[in-house]
Image: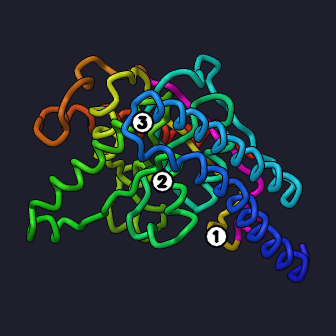
């Protein structure tokens, strides 16, 4: 692809996504104004409408990407999943493109993915409105040093995450977290001394807290995303360089000993959940090796 053509595709993609988000967020925002009324049934109804509008937004963006990027996205999704139940979900994380490809992969197969987002992003108006209208919660990412200096931060983060998870319980939802906590790079992999090839160590806090607030959940969905290219930047995505990719989803029944537990208060629960996810991560490592283009 010529440099000039690539540049124009990048600009067109950026504005296409921006316009689609803006057009859908206006009716989404208006629809959600009555949520200030303290009525549970009303909140459930508005949540259902918001999720449908969120799914329509995903379909619109995916259609635009198919036209602009000539997508070659291959989705392998289990047939036993449903849009009418609750899940917790996770994935490896390599690029901002992951968000769009995962939303597309789950579209009309599972409930709209609800991403746990970094609180630093709340100052971006569109992201703040997404947070408010389709219940995608913000989480603080405090360092270990900050928590050691002020242990109260950990408790506040836990309570905020649990409140968000309880909102998910109103309507069928897929509470989602990038388990690695950050995008994969070779430098981060070396710094962590990660035992997994092509993966950082998984963190389970957000998922475990979500599960503690969603008693309806019986299944975890693990997504594995692999791209044909080594390019990963946001600009690379906008220019269509990440248009060839594969997503493999696998479902895992949650063990009974992981349900209805407190991540904050039960140390053995944290260890059990970590062991459960570590085993999935070993399997994911092999899945990545097996995926060919």
Whether residues under marks 3 and 1 lie with C-beta atoms below 8 angstroms apart, the answer is no
**Of helix, strand and loop, which one carries label 1?**
helix
**83 is within the stretch colored magenta:** no
**Label 3 – label 1 distance at C-alpha:** 29 Å
Q: Looking at the image, which residue is at 40% across and 70% down?
A: 120
Per the rendered image, the range of residues in magenta is 236-252
Residue underneath mark 3: 168
Which mark, by number, is residue 234?
A: 1
Q: Is residue 198 visible?
A: no
**Label 2 – label 3 distance at C-alpha:** 13 Å
Label 1 environment density (alpha carbons within 10 Å; few <14, some 14–19, many ≥20): some
Vertical arrangement, residue 136 with respect to residue 49, above or below: below
**Label 2 – label 1 distance at C-alpha:** 24 Å
Whether residues under marks 2 and 3 lie with C-beta atoms below 8 angstroms apart, the answer is no
Q: Looking at the image, which residue is at 29% across and 38% down?
A: 208
**Of helix, strand and loop, which one carries label 3?**
helix
Work out whether mark 2 precedes mark 1 in sequence or the reverse, and give the earlier one. Answer: 2
On the image, the x and y values in percent for residue 153 come to 16, 61
Q: Is residue 107 visible?
A: yes
Which mark, by number, is residue 132?
A: 2
Q: Quadrant of the N terminus?
A: bottom right
On the image, the x and y values in percent for residue 241 come to 76, 65
Q: Looking at the image, which residue is at 36% across and 33% down?
A: 279
On the image, the x and y values in percent for residue 37 come to 41, 42
**250 is within the stretch colored magenta:** yes
Quarter where residue 236 is shown: bottom right
Which mark, by number, is residue 41?
A: none
């Amino acid at each position: 692809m010529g440099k000039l053509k690539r540049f124009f595709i990048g600009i067109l993609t950026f504005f296409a996504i921006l316009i689609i988000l803006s057009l859908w967020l206006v009716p989404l925002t208006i629809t959600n104004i009555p949520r200030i009324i303290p009525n549970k049934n009303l909140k459930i109804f508005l949540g259902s409408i918001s999720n449908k509008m969120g799914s329509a937004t995903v379909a619109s963006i995916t259609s635009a990407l198919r036209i602009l990027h000539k997508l070659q996205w291959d989705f392998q999704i289990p047939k036993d999943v449903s849009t009418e139940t609750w899940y917790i979900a996770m994935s490896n994380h390599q690029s901002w493109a992951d968000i769009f490809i995962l939303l597309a992969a789950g579209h009309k197969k599972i409930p709209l993915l609800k991403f746990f987002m970094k609180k630093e992003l709340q100052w971006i108006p569109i992201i703040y409105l997404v947070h408010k209208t389709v219940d995608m919660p913000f989480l603080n990412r405090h360092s270990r040093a900050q928590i050691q200096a002020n242990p109260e931060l950990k408790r506040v983060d836990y309570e905020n995450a649990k409140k968000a998870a309880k909102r998910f319980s109103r309507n069928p939802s897929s509470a989602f977290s990038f388990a690695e906590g950050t995008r994969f790079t070779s430098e981060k992999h070396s710094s962590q001394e990660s035992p997994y090839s092509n993966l950082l160590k998984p963190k389970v806090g957000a998922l475990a807290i979500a599960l503690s607030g969603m008693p309806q959940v019986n299944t975890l969905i693990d997504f594995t995303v692999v791209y044909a290219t080594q390019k990963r930047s946001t600009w690379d995505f906008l220019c269509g360089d990440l248009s060839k990719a594969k997503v493999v989803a696998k479902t895992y029944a949650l063990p009974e000993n992981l349900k209805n537990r407190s991540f904050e208060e039960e140390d053995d629960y944290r260890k059990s959940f970590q062991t459960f996810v570590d085993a999935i991560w070993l399997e994911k490592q092999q899945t990545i090796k097996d995926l060919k283009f």
